[in-house]
Amino acid sequence: MAEDRTQGQKPPVERRKHKRIPIALKIFLGYLITIVLVLISNFYLFHKMKILMELGNQIGRSVEFVAQERDVQHLADDMNRQYLAYISAYSQKFKDEYTKKYVAEAPGKILNKIEQIRQVENSLHFLDPQILEQINGYLDTLAMAVSPPERQRWDEAFKNLAFLLEKSIVDAQAQTQRLLARSREITASAIRGGILLMLAMLVLSAGIAYLIAKRISRPIAHLRQATRYARQGKYNIRVPFESHDEIADLTADFNAMMDALGELDRMKAMFLSSITHDLKSPLYRVRLGIENLVDGIHGSLNPEQMRTLEQILTDLDTLSRLIYDILDLQKLESGRFELHLEDVKIEDFVRETVRKHAISFADKGVGLAMKLKLKDVVVRMDVRQIERVFENLLSNALKFTPRGGKVVVIGGVDGDYVHFVVKDNGPGMTKEEAERVFDKFYRASTGKNVSGTGLGLAITKQIIEAHRGKIWVETEPGRGSEFHFLIPLAR
């Protein structure tokens, strides 16, 4: 927040010696951190995908193993049928030529199938290497039981071989189910992790973006606030340094500008004070001389001369009010203005003050009304200065309210304050004009042709704030204006 320079703020030149970090670099670093977070998220997902691909390959090999083992089972069953046929032909006492030929060729075919089974089995990857060793042992036993044929030895070896083949298939299927379950688990984990990582990345990215934006926007907001103070003539405000970038350079330049404006304002105040003090005595002598002329001390005057002198007196009154307003405003702004506080029944005071202006309102044809709910309410205040507040606000409302219009003074208790509203149905103001209406010498576009010093509302604001109150205006073009102000209740 903008602060007074007396609060230990280092001079701008010293703060600008820090290493400068451009805004573009800050934004780039934030972007780079976001990219790193995205890459971390992608690496996580790629790792999970790699695991899933490996599991897929294992599942494929397991399914292929089962298919090949099924083929081996069919080949073994066909081999067993050939052996049974071979045993049947071999056991016949009287063999014809065809049977003899079959008996001679069958052992070779059976041994050939045994080798086919052996080659297939040796090419497969068994979960338990001992099973492959046992299968090869049973295949050797089957080969030895072919010629000469040994039925009992064959049957026992074939039975054990069939059992091992089925066992290898069951084991492979169980492994496939485990791999599928594992892949489903990893897939679910990847989805959950991906979502959580994405959310975390979004939160971190948003947090980093917010911090960077805040680091950039906060000094700008302070500069904007200090600019509003400067527009109100408060040149003692200084903007603190919160960064070391282009905004810090702008802050240093702004504070230097405020120093220069403050010095100019002090010179202007000294000049105005000197001029206004020097003008008081000559104006008094001019007024005294004109009043002597009007009174006929130096001889009689014709009507035209009288009208001219009366107009000069009126202009002198305006000039005197301007001089005293400038002096009072300088006292208020410098804190040298003394308030003479006393407890006052506010309703009686307001009614009496407003009645003093009834004739002026009647002369212009503008209605004046009061709506007060302040019975027995006591306020500790400077009677003369609060009376001046009402005079300024009522005079201002009368100037801007057309004939046939109406001005209403509203008063009531609002918490620890008395809340007053002076409401008119004049031309109103724009939002930009309302923000500057309490500035010294400022005139809204609707008041260019209205007489006045341009200091009344500025003095009114200083008086209310000196009473620890608050004043503001609510207005819209074409709908009149409402000047609100608060004064603390007596404690």
Image (cartoon, rainbow, N blue to C red):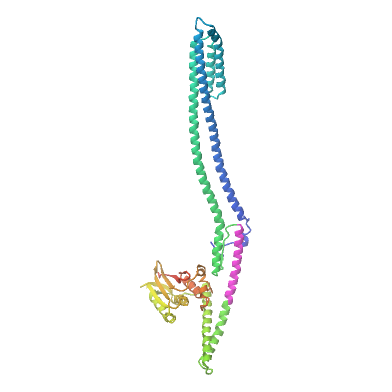
Majority secondary structure of magenta residues = helix
Q: Residue at x 54, y 10 (%)?
A: 102
Establish if 187 lies above or below 316.
above
Is residue 266 located in the magenta-colored stretch of the structure? yes
Observer-nearest of 468 and 372? 372
Observer-nearest of 182 and 145? 145
Establish if 35 lies above or below 185.
below
Residue at the extreme left of the image, as rendered: 375
Residue at the extreme bottom of the image, as rendered: 299
Q: What is the span of residues highlighted in magenta in the rendered image?
A: 244-271
Q: Which quarter of the rendered picture does the C terminus lie within?
A: bottom left
| Drawn side of residue 433 relative to residue 245, left or right | left
Q: How many marks?
A: 0
- In the rendering, at what x and y percent does residue 152 appear? 48, 11
| Drawn side of residue 95 relative to residue 406, left or right | right
Q: Is residue 400 visible?
A: yes
Is residue 22 located in the magenta-colored stretch of the structure? no
- In the rendering, at what x and y percent does residue 346 appear? 39, 74
Q: Is residue 345 visible?
A: no
- In the rendering, at what x and y percent does residue 6 appear? 56, 65
Residue at the extreme top of the image, as rendered: 94
Establish if 353 lies above or below 39.
below
Quarter occupied by residue 263:
bottom right
- In the rendering, at what x and y percent does residue 94 appear? 50, 4
| Drawn side of residue 263 relative to residue 389, left or right | right
Establish if 56 lies above or below 266.
above
Q: Residue at x 54, y 64 (%)?
A: 225
Quarter occupied by residue 251:
bottom right
